[in-house]
Image (cartoon, rainbow, N blue to C red):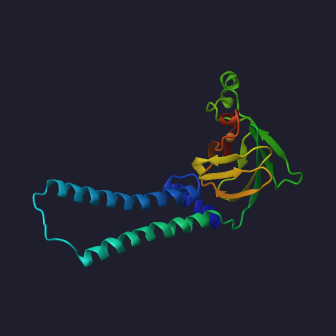
Amino acid sequence: MKKMNQSVFYSIFFNSSSVSICTMEQFHDYTMMFLSIITIFISIVILRLMTSKFFNYNFMENINMELIWTVLPIMILFLIAYPSLYYLYLFDLTLNPMMTIKVFGAQWYWIYENFDSEKGNSYPSYMLPDSEILSGKIYKMGWRLLETDTRLVVPYGTEIQCLTSSLDVIHSFSIPELGIKADALPGRLNSITFQISRPGLFYGQCAEICGTGHPFMPICVEAV
Ligand SMILES: [Cu+2]
């Protein structure tokens, strides 16, 4: 229940689709704050230097000034680096997943496997070709090159662990809207945890060049 409240809180106040992408957006804004301040400050200094008619030829050294322009950048870099590393390791944490899904990349489609069912059902997910989207009924209509015949259906508001692997070459399971990107490597299991904060459809594409069918293996996640 506590987790549900947290994700609803995120979706209401930050208008983002998952807890991790919300954190990334916040960190982006935080970093942009420093970038804006530095850019404005440097612009003012350059403009003043260009427009000023005064030159001080006796001004050779100033210990205090050198101290400030050494210590201040170090502090700014630390203020950016610390939360950056903190979030980097936070996203790797898998605390208490309520569900585990397995994602296999294949040339050129995805195979999803649900661990929680007793038999362990696995199903492939192919892209819907243009002909099917155009000729289909309304329920079949969707984004060109993004709609799939079967969707990965997951609950929202719960922590979901996603294990990725590949059957042939390297693929990458990526959904930008949810802040997910995990390489699918043959012979290896990669783990990524995410928590979707609202119901809806989320689209992604393979993010590692894997052959001629690479642009035609989209990911469609349905959060219910
Ligand atoms: Cu690919």
User: Furthest residue to the right?
Assistant: 119
- Quarter holding the N terminus is bottom right
Q: Is residue 180 left or right of residue 121?
A: left
Whole-percent x, y for residue 187 in the image:
80, 53
User: Furthest residue to the left?
Assistant: 53
Question: In terms of image quadrants, where is residue 214?
Answer: top right
User: Furthest residue to the bottom?
Assistant: 63
Q: Is residue 116 visible?
A: yes
Q: Which one is in front, 88 or 138?
A: 88
In the image, residue 40 sits, relative to residue 177, either above or below, namely below
Question: In terms of image quadrants, where is residue 134?
Answer: top right
Q: Is residue 93 left or right of residue 101?
A: left
Residue occupying image coordinates x 63% and y 49%: 199
Q: Is residue 161 visible?
A: no
Q: Which one is in front, 70 or 181?
A: 70
Whole-percent x, y for residue 53 in the image:
10, 57
Q: Quadrant of ligand 1?
A: top right
Residue occupying image coordinates x 40% and y 68%: 76
Residue occupying image coordinates x 14% and y 54%: 51
Q: Which one is in front, 157 or 147?
A: 147
Q: Which one is in front, 110 or 143?
A: 110
In the image, residue 70 sits, relative to residue 185, either above or below, namely below
Count of labels in the image? 0
Whole-percent x, y for residue 70 in the image:
35, 72
Whole-percent x, y for residue 161 in the image:
72, 58
Q: Is residue 122 left or right of residue 38?
A: right
Q: Is residue 82 left or right of residue 71?
A: right
